[in-house]
Image (tube, rainbow, N blue to C red):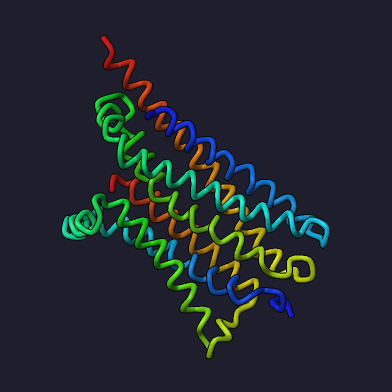
Amino acid sequence: MNEIILITHVLFGMGCILTTLWIFVDVLHASAANLPRIRSMCRASAVVMWLAFLIGGYWYVSYYKVDKALILKGPWPFAHNFIMETKEHLVITLLLVVTYLPIAAAGDLVADKGARRVLLWATGLAAVLALLMDLEGGLIALGVKVASHVNSP
Amino acid sequence: MENSGISKPTVSYGLALAITSVVNAILVVAKEESPIVMDLMKKITFHHWVTHCAFVVVLFFGLGCLFARANGGRGVNITASRLIRSLVAGVVLGSLIIVGFYGTGG
C-alpha cells in the first residue's frame, strides 16, 4: 500500500510537470484557436497538483516516520534534514502557484500581452518548482536506499 | 494600456500568492525556532505540517478575496510588469528563505 501511494503521488507530480511545460509552450503561441486548450490545461494542472499534494501529504503524515528514522541512521542524513524539510514546505508554494494558473488563464491572453506575460511567468515558476520537487523526491528515495544498504546485515 | 486585459482575480490572487509565499517561509522559521509555535500547530490539527498547509491555503484565498474587494470592489490597480515583479519576488524570496534556513542547519 505504501508503495502504491508513493507511485501515485509521483505519477500525479509528473502530470504537473508535463502540464505546466505544455501550458508554457502553448502560451508562447497564444491565439483564439488554442485559448480553450490553455485554460483546460491550467485546470488539469491544478487538479493533478492537488491530487499529488493530497496523496503525498497523506503518505508523509502516515508512513514517512519509518523512512525518516532509517535516513537519519544512514550515510545521507541530509536527505531528511535538508531535502525533505525543504520539499515539504516548498511544495506548498508550488501548490499555490499551480492553483493560480487557472485564475491567471481567465484573462484575455490573446489580446493582452500583459495577461500573457503574467501566465508565462507563473507557469515558468511552477515548472521549475515542480522539477525541483521531482529531483528532491528522487534524492529522498536514494537516501532511504543507501541507508538500507548500510543497515542491512 | 498594458494591464487592460488583466482580470481582477489575476491581480488579486497574484498579489496574494506573492505575500503567502513569504508568509509560508516565515511560518517555517517561526515553528522551527519556537517550540511554543510548533506545539500550538500540533495541537490545532494532529500534525504541524497539516496546520501549516491549511493556514497558508486559507491565507491565500482570504487575501485574494480581500484584494478583490479593495478600491470599492474595483480591486488593486497595478500594471502587469509590477504584478510579475511582485509575484516572482515573493515566490523566489519565500523559496530562498526556506532553502537558506534548512541549508544553514535550521
| Image quadrant where one finds the C terminus of chain A | top left
Quarter-wise, where is residue A17 in the image?
A: top right
Report the residue at 60% width, 77% height from top: B8
Image vertical order of residue A116 relative to residue A19, above or below:
below
In the displayed structure, A127 sits above or below B14; it is above
**Quarter-of-image position of residue A55:** top left
Q: How many marks?
A: 0
Which residue is at the far top?
A: A153
**Quarter-of-image position of residue A65:** top left
Which residue is drawn at the image coordinates 64% and 77% (left, top)? B79
Side of A145 where A127 appears, left or right = right
The residue under the point 30% across, 16% down is A150
Residue A89 place in picture, x, y as percent: 39, 50
Q: Classify A151 as above or below A57.
A: above
| Left or right side of B93 for A40 | right
Residue depicted at 69% across the width and 47% down the height: A22
Is B65 or B96 nearer to us in this picture?
B65
In the rendered image, the residue lying farthest to the bottom is: B72
Residue A47 position within the rendered picture, expressed as x and y whole percent measured from the top left: 55, 51
Q: Nearer the viewer, residue A90 or B99?
A: A90
